[in-house]
Amino acid sequence: MVGPRRRSATVTPLVTFVLVHGGWGGGWEWRPVAERLTRLGHSALTPSLAGLGERSHELSRHITLETHAADVVDVVESQPEARVILVGHSYGGAVITVAASRLSDRVRGLIYVDAFIPTDGQCVIDLVESEWAEVHVLESARSSGDGWLVPFPFPEDLADMPVEVADRYRSSWQPLATFTEPCAVDASVADLPTAFVHCVRKEQGHDAFLDSKRIARDRGWLVREIHAGHDVQIEDPDGIASLLHDLAAELALL
């Protein structure tokens, strides 16, 4: 296992992590992790996807999953010399899957953190229980979001979060088309070194990412667990930064 290394102005980063947030989130939530990865000798980028986080002013009914994948493609292409690992959390797993299909010659590996793993032609709501999707995504958009916006559907999860974090999620809206547009996944993605991180402490009985864990094992990916809730980047930035560093080594990407 490769240990941490101090950076200096003349040291090339070991790898560049592009940390892609999930639904209703923003780059802000991964910045503490990015700071820790930098101290471990890496570079880390925390883009906010169109219409979300620091880009909420761009919210539009025209934003789709492809829009968000293009955001990630733009970030990677702005780093032409970087050894890039895409990290996707939750909904961000779909984003990095589609983005990697456009970037397979530029991306060294993928890490899914409690994230969805779509196949070609699937959309995100195909990957959750149909009844839950109907009530909390489709009906919520119809009743509260003018037919194209989805309000944050997990208010019970906000009770234990810092107030400023809870407020950010509570006020966030996700364009419905990001959940309903089918993924276009190229077969070349399967050739990339890939790992899956399962957050094993869930407050609710149902774990939406057990299917993702099964898919990862069936594909022979590295699978690791971390004792944290779904939003591990907020709850345990030290733990997930250390695990990302270790996974990069285990994937032989350092």
Image (cartoon, helix red, strand yellow):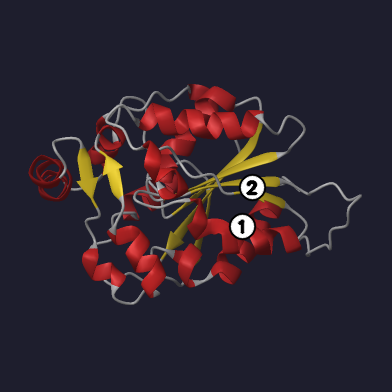
Instruction: Answer yes or no: is residue 117 visible.
Output: no
Query: Which mark is first along the chain, 2 or 1?
Result: 2
Q: Is mark 1 in CB contact (under 8 Å) with mark 2?
A: yes
Label 1 to label 2, Cα distance in Å?
A: 9 Å
Taking the image as shown, residue 52 lies to the left or right of residue 253, namely: left
Disc 2 element: strand
Q: Which residue is drawn at 33% across and 65% down?
A: 167
Label 2 sits on what residue type? Phe
Q: As drawn, which residue projects farthest toward the right?
A: 10
Total number of numbered discs in the rendering: 2
User: Which is in the foreground here, disc 1 or disc 2?
Assistant: 2
Say above or below: 77 vs 233.
above
Mark 2: few/some/many CA within 10 Å (<14, 14-19, 20+): many
Q: Where is residue 84 in the image (x, y as percent from the top left)?
A: 67, 39
Q: Is residue 173 left or right of residue 75?
A: left
Pointer 1: what residue? Answer: 244
Say which element carries label 1. Answer: helix
The residue under the point 27% across, 32% down is 177
Q: Which of 76 and 219 is in front in this view?
A: 76
Type of the residue with mark 1 = Leu
In which quadrant is the N terminus drawn? bottom right
Horizontal side of residue 215 vs 122, given as left or right:
right
Residue at 40 percent across and 52 percent down: it is: 25
Vertical order, 61 against 209 (above or below): above
Residue on which disc 2 sits:
17
Locate residue 174: give its quadrant. top left
